[in-house]
Amino acid sequence: MDVAQSRSAEPFAIAPMLAEIRQRRRELHKLGHIPQDLVAQFQALGIYRAFVPEQFGGGGMDAATFLRLIETISAADGSAGWVASFGFATKYLSSLPANTLAEIYGESPDVVFAGAVFPPQTAIAESGGYRVKGRWGFGSGSMGASLIGVGIKTEGEGGGLPRMAVMPRDRVTIEENWDVMGMFATGSHDLVVDDVLVPEHYTLIRGAPPSIDTPAYRYPTMAMAAQVLAIVGAGVAREAIDELIRMGTKQSITGAPLMAERPSVQIALAQMEAQLCSARAWFYEETDRVWSLAASGGEITKLDAARLRLVSTHIAKTGADVTRRAFEMSGTTGIFNAHPLSRLLMDALVVAQHAFMNDGTWQSGGAALLGLNTPPGYP
């Protein structure tokens, strides 16, 4: 069993799935999204019911357990971990009316929800709802979803947390145009909606207070939105380290010493391990601390949420740095598209580029530490 599996919450339960994902990496990249049979396995693991209220059959999973699952899946494949991370997205639905949540989970708590928020499109208010039309980018995981949300705004509305309209998947056209250097199998295509009337009780403010009081819903929504994506980078970095270790006995074509015998590789490997483990320790320390507040009904301050954002940016950047260094240590072997490290490098870089973890989030984090105002949605 490799290191990533041994750190999973349920390593034996998910080991066969991880092996299958590893075997199908090229297939997933060629397909351009995570297919329904793997989504069904995510459902069976309880990923999509993790944060659904227990009164609707939810799993009652704590944040750290969920994040460790995503990290472990991400080591098998970054795109698979990214799509699985949207099991968290049910927390976005938490600000829907309780009766609407009861409708959504009436048949099963394993509803797969995905969507895209930006750019918010102007929706026309009508009696009982909103007339929605437009196009949205970055619809990660939508190919396997049964329920989709899109960002909307009303005439004259601007600023603040975004509004979302939620509708069945069959009311949305997915234009398969995701063409990127990494995380290709996330299927983050454009979503197109053409004149759909969405009932008002199926619209929400993303990140607004929940309608039902549970520990999962009390845990900061937007902070966790960053965490579930950032931890993908940690999983990818773990796989990069493990791949470098596996390469240690590879003989150089130039007759140079084995990689494992080279001081430069030994030093780099030790430093990479220290970097990743340190980032993970802080990440999970803050996660457990804030989850304890949520579980006990304690006050979760903006500073608490901001610290979750800081650990997310830090681990995403660390994951990219570690993976880049593993790639550099691989020499010319890693430059081939068929080699795992080339894919791992691109995936790790894409994680760190996300808006939730880009360099601007350092400034917002510093402002929060100083007690200054931060942009909407941060923390």
Image (cartoon, rainbow, N blue to C red):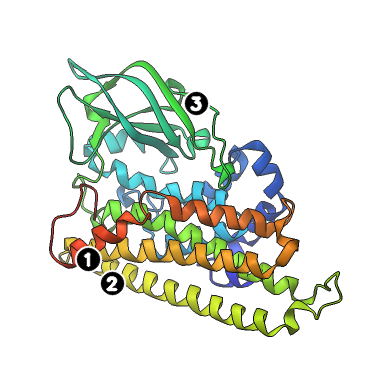
Of the 4 image quadrants, the one containing the C terminus is bottom left
Front-most of residues 33 and 38:
33
Q: Position of residue 183 (x, y in %)?
A: 55, 47
Q: Is residue 171 placed above or below 207 in the rendered structure?
A: above
Q: Position of residue 142 (x, y in %)?
A: 48, 35
First along the sequence among labels 3 and 2 = 3
The quarter of the displayed image where residue 342 is located: bottom right
SS for dot 3: strand
Q: Which mark is residue 159?
A: none
* Amino acid found under the numbered disc labelled 3: Ile
Report which residue position mark 3 lands on: 174
Q: Is residue 120 placed above or below 369 in the rendered structure?
A: above
Q: Is residue 195 placed above or below 145 in the rendered structure?
A: above
- Residue drawn at (36%, 45%) of the image: 90
State the separation of the CA atoms marked 3 and 2: 39 Å
Q: Position of residue 327 (x, y in %)?
A: 64, 64
Of the 4 image quadrants, the one containing the N terminus is bottom right
- Residue drawn at (18%, 60%) of the image: 302
* Amino acid found under the numbered disc labelled 2: Arg
SS for dot 2: helix
Question: Would residue 177 appear left or right of 116 to someone viewing this image?
Answer: right
Residue lying farthest front?
A: 254
Question: Would residue 197 appear left or right of 74 to someone viewing this image?
Answer: left
Report which residue position mark 2 lands on: 289
SS for dot 1: helix
